[in-house]
Image (cartoon, rainbow, N blue to C red):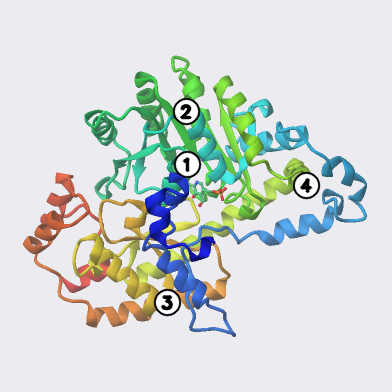
């Protein structure tokens, strides 16, 4: 019986596949401790007011009221109401894997609207998948073979290792981005990552970026996108742009889709360009599992569509969303309101953090901030970061995500999600952070000398190969944003 078999029996006889027995899903890593802490002791305002507040989950819960209102006003959209049940048979039977035509048209139109109607999407190229998770894996299955690599700017979404690599066997090679320039992707870093692959005889099949970035909450500018498009075009490899946060951009600079950029670049081979999308963040509907592969490459569209049988969106969901997304008045109101609310929450949250000396990377998108706690590290290493993180989970009782889980090269950054809770919970979280910081002012050990910090960085498990970062740390005119807390103490 399986339950009575020792772990050794699995290992020595290879009873299960390599996929089943390797750790590519990432769920055994230490970062899940934060989730476990939350699961064991979840905050509730009355039932468990001292519980852990979940700020590790990138969910957009700020505009659910608008969707609920629409559903009440449009009962026919669901086949589960007297108004909609006449559609039951049509929806319940097998549909082909192209998806309902009205769903693909509505999604294509919505994708255009979210991108300011500066780019149009062809419904014939819309391929469904189980969320962006399924869409990202599908595109990798179409573009790369086991052992091939994709380059990805770090810090990057932690589940990319699982989504892009676990079952496909594709490797991820980080393009190391750093704080001195606001974590922008540079040509130099891109070339360096490519060379790492070449030196190790690994074939690079493409670059994958998130735009806006998770975890940075920043949009990629047009020049960076052009640089990336030219790079993949020169090397004849692919560019995958995960645009899952496109409609979360709440202030300038505006969002620029790669679809818009390639319109001005007639010389490039558009067969190399692919967009991943989902309704999980922009509409706040991760439970609906709506993911989209949009490729400019006909062969990829055909192959991804064949693969979509493994992760179709249910016809009931397609039917409902086709009606919702075709309602122009609703869509415009939802997009405008959602941005306003995200902006307000972001402004309030970052403003209050700033008042207690905690700065975040200046951002204008996403459901999270990239919080800078470098000044609170006892040692500038991954271990030092995880030590502080455990204090935040166990003492402050907030589950945030440490930068090392995003493969960030510089310890001390944390991603904090701000859109998955109500105003009252935000205030509780802020209050806990305030009291943590005021305690920390007394308890935080004196900062290590610059020499000591440099030694720690050289010894640390994380690599600090960028001279500018080291130099800026050593310079009294550091270009790294320093928290007022540090300034106050020095
Ligand atoms: C950049 C990025 N891509 C993909 C996903 C997965 O999205 P989905 O829930 O649509 O599978 C996420 C979720 O957090 C994400 O942040």
Give SS at disc 2.
Answer: helix
User: Residue 143 bears which disc, if any?
Assistant: 2
The part of the image, by quadrant, that contains residue 90 is top right
CB within 8 Å, label 3 to label 4: no
> Which mark is first along the chain, 2 or 4?
2
x, y percent for residue 117: 61, 33
Q: Nearer the viewer, mark 3 or mark 2?
A: 2
Task: Report if the beta carbon of the residue with label 4 is closer than 8 angstroms to ligand 1.
Answer: no
Residue 8 lies, with reference to residue 296, above or below; the image says: below
Name the residue rendered at 83%, 56% in the picture.
73
> Which mark is first along the chain, 3 or 1?
1
Instruction: Give the residue pinned by disc 1.
Output: 167
Circle 1 crowding by C-alpha within 10 Å: few under 14, some 14–19, many from 20: some
Instruction: Give the residue pinned by disc 3.
Output: 397
The answer to which of 229 and 131 lies nearer the viewer is 131
User: Residue 316 bears which disc, if any?
Assistant: 4
Residue 135 lies, with reference to residue 413, above or below; the image says: above
């Amino acid at each position: 019986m399986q339950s009575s078999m020792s772990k050794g029996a699995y290992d020595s006889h290879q009873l299960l596949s390599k996929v089943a027995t390797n750790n590519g899903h990432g769920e055994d890593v230490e970062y899940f401790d934060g989730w476990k802490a939350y699961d064991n002791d979840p905050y509730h305002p009355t039932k468990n007011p001292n519980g852990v507040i979940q700020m590790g989950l990138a969910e957009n819960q700020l505009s659910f009221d608008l969707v609920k209102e629409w559903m009440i006003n449009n009962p026919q959209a669901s086949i589960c109401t007297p108004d909609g049940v006449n559609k039951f048979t049509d929806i319940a039977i097998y549909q082909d894997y192209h998806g309902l035509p009205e769903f693909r048209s509505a999604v294509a139109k919505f994708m255009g609207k979210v991108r300011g109607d500066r780019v149009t999407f062809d419904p014939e190229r819309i391929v469904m998948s189980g969320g962006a998770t399924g869409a990202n894996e599908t595109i990798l299955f179409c573009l790369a073979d086991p052992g091939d690599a994709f380059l990805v700017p770090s810090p990057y979404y932690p589940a990319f290792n699982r989504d892009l690599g676990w079952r496909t066997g594709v490797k991820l090679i980080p393009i190391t981005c750093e704080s001195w320039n606001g974590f922008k992707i540079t040509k130099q870093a891109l070339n360096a990552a490519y060379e790492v692959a070449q030196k190790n005889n690994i074939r690079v099949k493409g670059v994958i970026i998130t735009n806006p970035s998770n975890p940075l909450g920043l949009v990629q500018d047009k020049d960076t996108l052009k640089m990336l498009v030219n790079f993949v075009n020169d090397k004849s490899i692919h560019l995958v742009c995960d645009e899952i946060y496109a409609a979360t951009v709440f202030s300038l600079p505006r969002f620029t889709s790669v679809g818009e950029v390639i319109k001005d670049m007639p010389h490039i081979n558009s067969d190399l360009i692919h967009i991943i999308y989902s309704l999980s963040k922009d509409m706040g509907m991760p439970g609906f599992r709506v993911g989209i592969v949009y490729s400019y490459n006909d062969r990829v569209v055909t192959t991804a569509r064949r693969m979509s049988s493994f992760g179709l969106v249910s016809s009931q969901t397609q039917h409902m969303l086709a009606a919702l997304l075709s309602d122009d008045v609703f869509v415009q109101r939802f997009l405008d309101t959602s941005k306003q609310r995200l902006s307000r929450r972001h402004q309030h949250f970052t403003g209050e953090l700033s008042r207690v000396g905690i700065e975040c990377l200046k951002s204008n998108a996403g459901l999270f901030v990239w919080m800078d706690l470098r000044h609170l590290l006892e040692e500038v290493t991954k271990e030092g970061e995880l030590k502080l993180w455990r204090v935040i989970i166990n003492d402050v009782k907030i589950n945030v995500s440490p930068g090392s889980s995003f493969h960030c090269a510089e310890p001390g950054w944390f991603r904090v999600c701000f859109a998955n809770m109500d105003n009252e919970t935000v205030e509780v979280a802020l209050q806990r952070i305030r009291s943590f910081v005021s305690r920390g002012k007394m308890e935080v050990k004196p900062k290590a000398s610059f020499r000591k910090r440099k030694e720690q960085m050289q010894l640390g498990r994380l690599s600090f190969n960028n001279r500018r970062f080291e130099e800026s740390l050593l310079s009294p005119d550091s270009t790294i944003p320093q928290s007022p807390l540090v300034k106050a103490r020095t």
